[in-house]
Image (tube, rainbow, N blue to C red):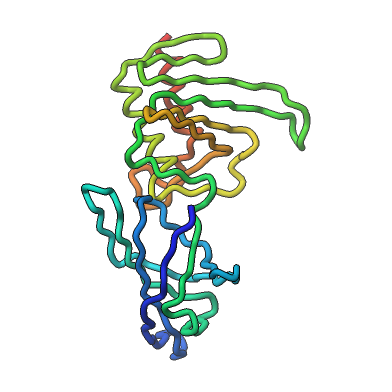
Amino acid sequence: MKTYLTLEKSNPHKSNYDGSLYKSYVTSFFSYTQSHHTINDFYDEEGNVYIPEVYSFCEKKVDPDTHEMFVRADVEFEDGLNMDFLLHKPLYFKEPEWFHDLTHEEIVQLNCVFEQYEPVLGSLIERKNVYINVNGTVQIDDKIYHLSEPKICEFFYEIKINLGSEKTYQPLLCGGGSSRYILHLKSGKSIEYSGDYALFDGTPYGCKRYTKLIVDDLLKQVIDSF
């Protein structure tokens, strides 16, 4: 998803560390994606890339009728560069390709594929397929179990936060080739994720709450109950 914005004004600052001068820039934009406004880089209409180093969100307002969000942010650029030449010119940034805003979505089924390989990129030694349904049915390979709907709803809520909130990120070295997830939504959409995801600190679950750990916790309830 490509998001349009402009740098509206610059604010001069003096560093408390070494007394050097630098500038930050105020920007705002409207979006229908209510979460995960992570700005990795800006680019202009010619394709030139400008890397923000520090940014903070000053304001977020959501229109309750249209679900459109107004975002105002303060941005500093890499190496404290003076970017006044970009003021009032169109800039863009993109959400990560894997990210989907799940704010207004309802999960009805989660399919998981877990693969285990021999050490050092050896051959596949095990593959498990797991299907978790909103009605409480859990299928692990060819065995079917049942959990209460409240437990499944709690699980889907945590998965929704884990995969589609403004705090979601994709950790490095998290076994991307060994975990895959397919979300089936009530709206009819299906979304596939490769690898595990987590949340930044400051959330109810913390940055170590990977997708696979959430699924494993549910499966332990399934196995322990039989």
Observer-nearest residue: 8 or 78? 8
Residue at 49% over, 19% down: 131
Residue at 33% over, 44% down: 204
**Dividing the image into 4 quarters, which one contains the C terminus?**
top left
Tell me where residue 64 appears, x and y as whole percent: 21, 48
Image height of 62 relative to 158, above or below: below
Left or right of 42, for residue 205: left
Tell me where residue 94 appears, x and y as whole percent: 50, 57
Residue at 34% over, 42% down: 103
Left or right of 90, for residue 158: left
Residue at the limit of the structure toward the left, as seen here: 64
Dividing the picture into quadrants, the one containing residue 105 is top left
Tell me where residue 202 appears, x and y as whole percent: 35, 52
Left or right of 127, for residue 43: left
Image height of 191 relative to 24, above or below: above
Observer-nearest residue: 124 or 43? 43
The number of numbered discs placed on residues in the rendered structure image is 0
Residue at 48% over, 46% down: 99
Image height of 34 relative to 215, above or below: below
